[in-house]
Amino acid sequence: QMFGAEVQLRSQGTTYSASVTMASDKQQAVVRFEKPVRLSSPGQSAVFYDGDRVIGGGIVGEMT
């Protein structure tokens, strides 16, 4: 399942447009940003938004 979202990393306050693809078990997701983004380090939070509404999130596991 893939959907578009605004993604906020850590508590930076800035959101970035991205596509989010959920794994079939819904325990992991791959986030692809529309533009290059300096990423947080593993262990930091990522929160997915649809406007002002939180639609998901998780902990950054690995970055490629």
Image (cartoon, rainbow, N blue to C red):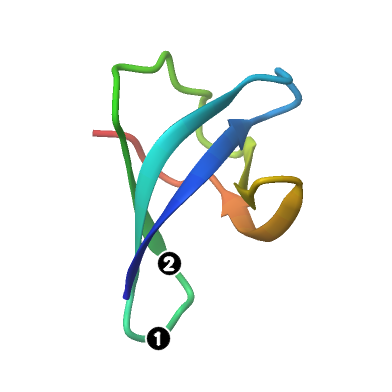
Q: Residue furthest bottom?
A: 25
Tell me what residue is drawn at x 32 percent, y 84 percent.
24
Quadrant assignment for the C terminus: top left
Look at mark 2 in the image and give the residue it sits on. 28
Q: Residue furthest front?
A: 51
* In the foreground, 31 or 35: 35
What is the spatial separation of the Cα atoms under label 2 and label 1, in whole angstroms?
7 Å
* In the foreground, 58 or 7: 7
Q: Position of residue 49 (x, y in %)?
A: 63, 49
Which amino acid type corresponds to the residue marked 1 in the rendered image? Asp
Tell me what residue is drawn at x 68 percent, y 29 percent.
10
- The answer to whether the residues at label 2 and label 1 have Cβ atoms under 8 Å apart is yes
Look at mark 1 in the image and give the residue it sits on. 25
Which amino acid type corresponds to the residue marked 2 in the rendered image? Gln
Q: Position of residue 47 (x, y in %)?
A: 64, 46
User: Is 64 above or below relative to 13?
Assistant: below
Tell me what residue is drawn at x 32 percent, y 76 percent.
1
8 relative position to 52: left or right: left
User: Is 37 above or below relative to 1?
Assistant: above
3 relative position to 36: left or right: right
Numbered disc 1: secondary structure: loop
Q: Position of residue 29 (x, y in %)?
A: 39, 61
